[in-house]
Amino acid sequence: MANLSINFAGIKSPNPFWLASGPPTNTGEQVARAFEMGWGGAVWKTIGRPIVNVSSRLGGLDEADRRMVGLSNIELISDRPIETNFREIAEVKKRFPDRAVVASLMLDSEKEWHDMVRRSEDAGADGLELNFGCPHGMCERGMGSAVGQEPAVVRKITSWVKKAARVPVLVKLTPNITDIREPATAAVEAGADGLVLINTVRSMIGVDLDRLVPVPSVAGRGTPGGYSGPAVKPIALHMVSALARDPRISVPISGIGGINTWRDAAEFIALGSTSVQICTAVMHHGFRIIEDLVEGLSNYLDEKEMTSVNELIGRVARTVGEWGELELGYKVAADIDPDTCIGCQVCYVSCRDGGHSAIHLPEDALTPGHLAPRRPIITERLAAATETASPGSADSSRRRAHSVSTARTGYRVPWVDQTQCVGCNLCSLVCPVHGCITMREIASKQ
């Protein structure tokens, strides 16, 4: 069994799965219960000045029959007494000394930062996470993403904290910025020991068309919130890989954003994350998802003959580059398996209306000189179907095959003109049958 333990900038944990700062880490009781179920670490819900939160706070985005593919919140940092949070951090750390406990902080003046650094360390926190990412509420007070969007301010506050801190300092970045590398390099230059990304994406999740108010609404009014969940994963993966490939980023990365399964986590790690942090999936499914995360990642590493999770970190990052670095002579083309195709013709419609018109109906003629390896099979089967529909000689059936509609014969399997196909993948993405449409490498001269 592969070794899942990690050492993140000096913070050790038995596995790379940490709870992200948020509602699941709001109390000591929650964090203790998560640790009992196997989580490797937790970043405490952000501690700062006394805060009053609003009601309601969350809005969800559904897609077809799948609930909450995206989640937006307008909840602020911890509204519990500061002394209560530090007392519970001390209790949890004493009870679970082998788990990573990181204090998330968000403050204003240098004096306040130094005071909270001291109190966090006195409570036994293994590290500090500076919340420069919250995109709602706190940014209006000059904190959260208001800091993360200004590299000079990131550098200044990180320097403040590093002057006082004795434990590793992690900087949590906002995705609400054009180039994530700018605040990241500022944090590293100021001495940050690790980077954490992404925080939530500023968003408006929807409108209640019955009440004609934003979602969520507070007494009939709304405000942009922070978007999280599976829908933000591509944004997070891009930003993690951007930092992992940047030679100026010399510190480990903790990846966050839409992680639901061990596969999601493995993708983040392969692109350069040392640890992964999870919040929305726990809010949706509970702490028990740690069982799938640990077992799945462990089995995957075993299958890949990796003895440690460290062997996976950044393995894919080196294959990511700029568009201009791609091999322009490389070509793939779609291949439809006539034995598994159900004839729905969704691929035909998508390619005709949204692609490059490379997929054709069974009776369509092949343009002279074009390549379509599957077409002879389709022609034979259409002829057989035509023979069944209108009995006669095989030769006459083949001749009729090109002029008989699929609606009449019942044979609906399309074929691909590989000369027209640009290899965009659209057909394989819309096909409802897994494995029916594959993308095959073809020689460039074809």
Image (cartoon, rainbow, N blue to C red):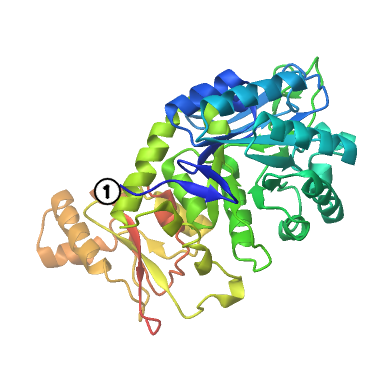
Which residue appears at 54% of the width and 57% of the height? Answer: 272
Residue 6 in view: yes
Q: Nearer the viewer, residue 437 or 294?
A: 294
Dot 1: element: helix
Q: Residue at x 32, y 57 (%)?
A: 304
Q: Position of residue 9 (x, y in %)?
A: 60, 51
Q: Amino acid at mark 1?
A: Arg
186 displayed left or right of 238: right
On the image, which quarter does residue 142 sit in? top right
Residue, far left: 393
Q: Residues within 10 Å of mark 1 (few under 14, many from 20)?
A: few
Q: Which residue occupies 40% across, 75% down?
A: 419
Quarter of the image for the C terminus: give it. bottom left
Q: Quadrant of residue 144?
A: top right
Query: Is 344 displayed left or right of 255 in the figure?
Result: left
On screen, 338 above or below 6? below
**x then y, percent, for residue 130:** 74, 42
Percent position of residue 180, x then y: 71, 56
Q: Residue furthest bottom?
A: 445
Does the rendering let one see residue 400? no
The location of residue 279, given as percent across then percent down, is 58, 33
Residue assigned mark 1: 408
Q: Residue at x 41, y 49 (%)?
A: 346
Which of the pair 429/198 is nearer the observer? 198
Location of residue 73 with respect to 199 vertically, above or below: above
